[in-house]
Amino acid sequence: MAKAKGPNEVEAVLIYDDDDERMLAEIKQIMAAYVPVVSDARTPPEEVQFISSDSNSYFEKMSEQLPKNALDIVKLIKAYRLLKSNATGSSLSPQAEVDVADDSRADVSVGQQQESEIKASEGQGERSFFPATLVIKRISSYFLLKDYSAPSAAQFVLLLIPKRSREHLIGDLEEEYRSVVLPQYGRFWAGVWYWGQTLWAIGPYLWVGLKRVFGWAAIIKLIGG
Amino acid sequence: MDYLGEFEQIVMLAILRLGETAYGMTIRKEILEVASRPASLGAVYTTLERLEDKGFLTSAIGEVTEERAGRAKKYFRVTGLGQAALKQALKSTEAMKDGLAWEGA
């Protein structure tokens, strides 16, 4: 199975429940223009982070949480379904350009003829026969900063670190968390790791602080204060 | 002249090994991989600050990346004074080690 290469990529798995191999091949071809389609299966893999269905309301509900190119895929699938709902049998080109405006209901720009077909079918209402479910598996936190940023309470604790190194230390921790730990271990264990590192990191600073405080106390005691 | 502690020596050696890419995360990783010694970022940074105060290191603010949530890297380099102190410390350790008969060695 091919793995997504970079931290900015989204890995997609196509889940299908239909035997229309031609249609699936076309969908995969379309998706491949946007994301690495790593596999197809009849049941979602266990590690899947997000599952979209072909329900419009579900798309719209989840669209805010989706990375941008995943949203593009959702649009592609919707357009594909509209095209397929026409009797013309035309298919969507893999080179189709997606309108990436931040609007989940935006249409896919696929050339004038196909666009008019989409509009025509919109008038008829969408038929829900799309056989496949798209599964987006999160590879990195890059796109989903809201959901996969480091634990905020731990970041608050890190404010105990003196200003001189605070920004750089938190940046190092954040970099390792996002680029190494999170993709490898998932959100829960990455959160546990981050907390552990946080407590471990502030230890030496607390020790230095304590030494300063008790050092002064000892001096005051010595001079009889 | 300030003397170098054992962990200070390890941190300085890691910086020398890393060259241009020595910042907190890579220094910690180098220490773990080469010296097989886990160290917290806090321990690394307190040591780096101490060495910088002694004049053994200089630092420069590096690039900001999105992976770091917009926080800049801080790159470190060993100064001439730092290299001299490190050489002296390693030489002293070697001298103390010479002639020792290690049990079970």
Image (cartoon, rainbow, N blue to C red):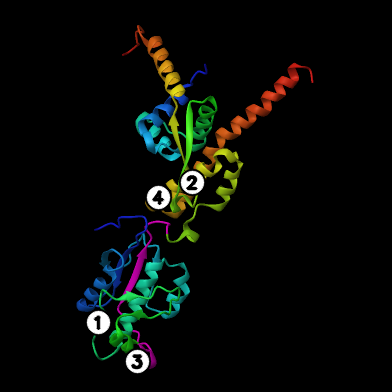
What SS does tag 1 mark?
loop
- Tag 4, which chain? A
Amino acid type shown at disc 2: Ala
- Label 2: which residue? B72
In this image, A26 relative to A103: left or right? left
- Label 3: which residue? A120
Distance from the alpha carbon under mark 3 to that under mark 1: 15 Å
**Magenta segment boundaries in residue numbering:** A119-142
Distance from the alpha carbon under mark 4 to that under mark 3: 45 Å
Q: Is residue B12 depicted above or below B41 in this figure?
A: above
Q: Position of residue B57 (x, y in %)?
A: 47, 29
- Label 1: which residue? A91
Q: Nearer the viewer, mark 3 or mark 2?
A: 2
Amino acid type shown at disc 3: Ala
Distance from the alpha carbon under mark 3 to that under mark 2: 52 Å
Distance from the alpha carbon under mark 2 to that under mark 4: 16 Å
- Tag 2, which chain? B
Q: Position of residue A185 (x, y in %)?
A: 40, 51
In the image, are marks 3 and 1 on the same chain?
yes
